[in-house]
Image (cartoon, rainbow, N blue to C red):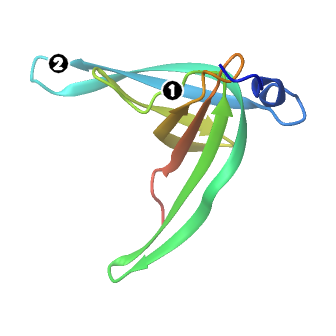
Amino acid sequence: MALLDVTDVLLDPDFMDTGLVCNRMTQAVDSHGRATNTVTGTPFAAVVTSDKGDVLHRNADGSRIIGSITVHTPFRLSDGSAGQDADEIVWQGRTYTVVNVNDYSHFGRGFVCATCDLKPLSG
């Protein structure tokens, strides 16, 4: 285990944002064989930074805005697994999908670093 406890910084009120909600998606298969999501919203705190920011993509058939953020938190986020879709994060009125989670549980009390993409694409 590493000796540096990064969660001391992550839990510092000067860095932490407490206005996040994690919508955890649990999947069930209905009688027609279609997957449906059951959403459970859980408030949590994290340090949120820009990943790539908002980027305008121009294509021949139109343009769209994509965006991403990075979330550092002791709350265990998920990018999906068997029977569970990726978590959705609601932050500052925008919804993001967790696309990648790096586990740093060996740093003190542990935390995750998640990359989240803006949902839905707009433009």
Left or right: 88, with 32 as reference point? right
Up-down: is 67 above or below 73?
A: below
Q: Residue 116: image x %, image y %?
A: 53, 44
SS of the residue under disc 1: strand
Name the residue located 32 percent from the left edge and 79 percent from the top edge.
61
Name the residue located 67 percent from the left edge and 53 percent from the top edge.
50
Rendered image quadrant of residue 10: top right
Query: Could you tell me if the residues under marks 1 and 2 are in contact, i.e. CB atoms within 8 Å?
Result: no
Up-down: is 17 above or below 44?
A: below
Left or right: 111, with 29 as reference point? right
Residue indicated by mark 1: 23
Spatial CA span between label 1 and label 2:
21 Å
Q: Quadrant of the N terminus?
A: top right
**What's the residue type where badge 1 is placed?**
Asn
Could you classify mark 1 by the number of other residues whose Cα lies within 10 Å: few (under 14), some (14-19), or many (20 or more)? many
Question: In the image, which is nearer the foreground, mark 1 or mark 2?
Answer: 1
Residue indicated by mark 2: 30
Query: Which one is nearer the viewer's eye here, 114 or 34?
Result: 114
Up-down: is 20 above or below 69?
A: above
Which residue in the rendered view is the most extreme toward the bottom?
Answer: 60
